[in-house]
Amino acid sequence: MTDYKTLIDAETWAFIERTNSYYPPDTIDYTIAQQREIYDRMCREFFAGYPEGVAVETSAIATPTRDIPIRIYRSAPQAAVTVLYFHGGGFILGGLDSHDDVCAELCARTGYEVVSVDYRLAPEHLHPAAFDDVMSAFEWATTNREHPIALCGDSAGGNLAAAVSHATRGHPRKPIGQVLIYPGLGGDRSRGSYVTHAEAPMLTMRDLEFYKNIRTGGADGTGDITLSPLADADFANLPPTVLITAECDPLSSDGEAYRDRVVAAGGRAYWFEEPGLVHGYLRARHTVGRARISFTRIVNAVAALARGEWVP
């Protein structure tokens, strides 16, 4: 058994306990509507406000079948880069409000335009609905923005960002970089962190199985790279990639595996595992020293990739 009492420091434990007070570990046993209500309330409790100087606009991308809500953050008159941000939430939770302050801070600290995408959620909209929406958002950005496009996402959103990168390698405006924050990429669940941290605080293997089945409606998605980017047989020509994961998280090994595959194919990828942190630590960036340092690492990675620089 992993000894979390020694791996996780007091600040992080306080964050875990605060999170659990709003969002108990057994929340996946509730109805989807109840889970969303609990999650949204938790997000409101952690909301840190907007940094000074950030202008925010809520809009929508018109597609032939539906409008995709987006929220645009700007802190400079002329943004040099647009960062498409895809939020986490297990493909069933979250939206424009859940990661509102994270996107605002990313905008303020990089000076780039950040566009948060409110993709469709399961179980009402099964895979590939979310993927289709983020692809539509990418196409919208390449049509409506002359400057480069970068991708960023956490957890489920990291999965979607990677899927877009794989799908757009031949695009004339393909992403200039991607930053994936504790993403689930469809790795081998019989080894690595999936085993070592199967019962980690904040995210367990039971949670992962639940989210996977809800997203697909229980269908077998083996080999579907829009569902599991690690299932791709070709990792060449992907954008420069930074993966930042939490040590105490069953998904952490996906970061390592993805890095290895990109590098083996001749690409540039860097993986950093944050010691002693847990899944969802973005919300701890103002209260936990390790999370604060990691958020700065994320901001710097987005800024560097968007400038065409390599991070390590």
Image (cartoon, helix red, strand yellow):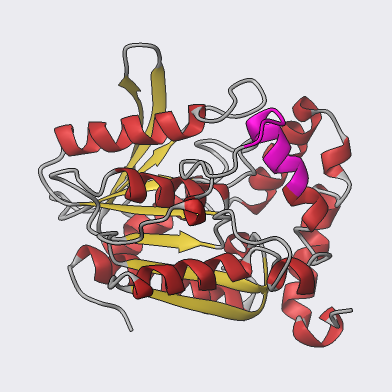
In this picture, residue 209 sits left or right of residue 295 = right
Q: Position of residue 301 (x, y in %)?
A: 35, 71
Which quadrant holds the C terminus? bottom left
Q: Is residue 51 visible?
A: no
In the depicted structure, whether residue 203 falls above or below residue 65: below
User: Where is residue 7, by image quadrant?
Assistant: bottom right
**Going 77% across and 38% down the picture, which residue do you hit?**
38
In this picture, residue 236 sits left or right of residue 80 = right
Q: Position of residue 108 (x, y in %)?
A: 33, 59
Q: Position of residue 204 (x, y in %)?
A: 79, 58
Q: Depth check: 263 or 297 in front?
A: 263
Q: Position of residue 174 (x, y in %)?
A: 21, 49
Q: Residue furthest top?
A: 65
Quick check: is 215 in the magenta stretch?
yes
Numbered range of the magenta stretch: 209-220
In this picture, residue 195 sits left or right of residue 238 = right
Q: Residue furthest left?
A: 146
In the depicted structure, whether residue 122 falls above or below residue 147: above
Quick check: is 13 in the magenta stretch?
no
Q: Depth check: 257 or 233 in front?
A: 233
**Going 40% across and 41% down the picture, which residue do you hit?**
116
Which quadrant holds the N terminus? bottom right
**Going 84% across and 65% down the picture, which residue do you hit?**
199
Q: Is residue 89 visible?
A: yes
Label tally: 0
Q: Depth check: 226 or 80 in front?
A: 226
The chief SS type of the magenta part is helix
**Going 89% across and 47% down the picture, which residue do you hit?**
26
